[in-house]
Image (tube, rainbow, N blue to C red):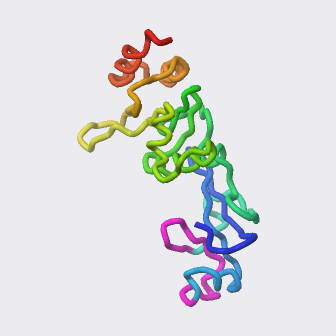
Amino acid sequence: MKGVIGMAKYAIYRSETGYYYYEYHDTMETIEKTKFNGIITEDNLPVVIGGTGGFFHFNKDDFMFEKIVECDGCPLTLEEMYFKNQKEFKLGWMSPDGDTYSCDYTSHTKAAVMIAQELGLDTKLPERALGKKGWLKIIDSWDGVQREHGQFVYSLTGKITKRQADKLFDLGLYNNDEVKKLIADCEDRW
């Protein structure tokens, strides 16, 4: 996502599950070092460049905008980008210790990359690396037919820890069919 070498500016935004950032450019000098050199003109400034290859005019009055930061490297920590142990947790990742990292329904892979990096795991297949280490993936179970979205708890290993079971109970997911099966299969190990 970073197109500038050295110190860069980022626009920080808040979502329901954590903060996110875009590259922030307010001078033509910084634009010259991006793939948008010759595309973005001075009358477009300031702009933010998103991680999906596009850019848009920066609006400081955007209700999700928080602040501009200048730094060398990623401007947010794992816990800032994916709120840890958020009371309103719905979707995301759960560690074997029962800690949750919130994300929206499309950000599981991005969250897995950051978690795997933090843990020193292989980031080529971050979701699989987390799954092998006993992490649970809580995903949206909506299939387009149901009237409401639900939550599905996935375990790559088919196992669950006591702490994960306790946390799933706290989150109201204890009666999900897959959770009942995981608990039944693992209860004798606790």
Of residues 10 and 73, the one drawn nearer to the viewer in this rendering: 73
Q: Is residue 156 above or below residue 118?
A: above
Residue at x 53% of width, y 21% of height: 170
Residue at x 61% of width, y 65% of height: 22
**159 left or right of 47?**
left
**142 left or right of 74?**
left
Residue at x 49% of width, y 23% of height: 168
Q: Is residue 150 above or below residue 160?
A: below
**Is residue 47 part of the magenta span, yes or no?**
yes
Residue at x 71% of width, y 68% of height: 9
Residue 76 picture location, percent across and down: 68, 53
Residue 130 picture location, percent across and down: 50, 39
Q: Which residues are magenta?
A: 38-56
**58 left or right of 152?**
right
Residue 84 picture location, percent across and down: 62, 37
Of residues 155 and 172, the one drawn nearer to the viewer in this rendering: 155
**4 left or right of 144?**
right
**Is residue 140 part of the magenta span, yes or no?**
no
Q: Is residue 49 above or below residue 183?
A: below
Residue situated furthest bottom in the rendering: 38
Of residues 50 and 16, the one drawn nearer to the viewer in this rendering: 50
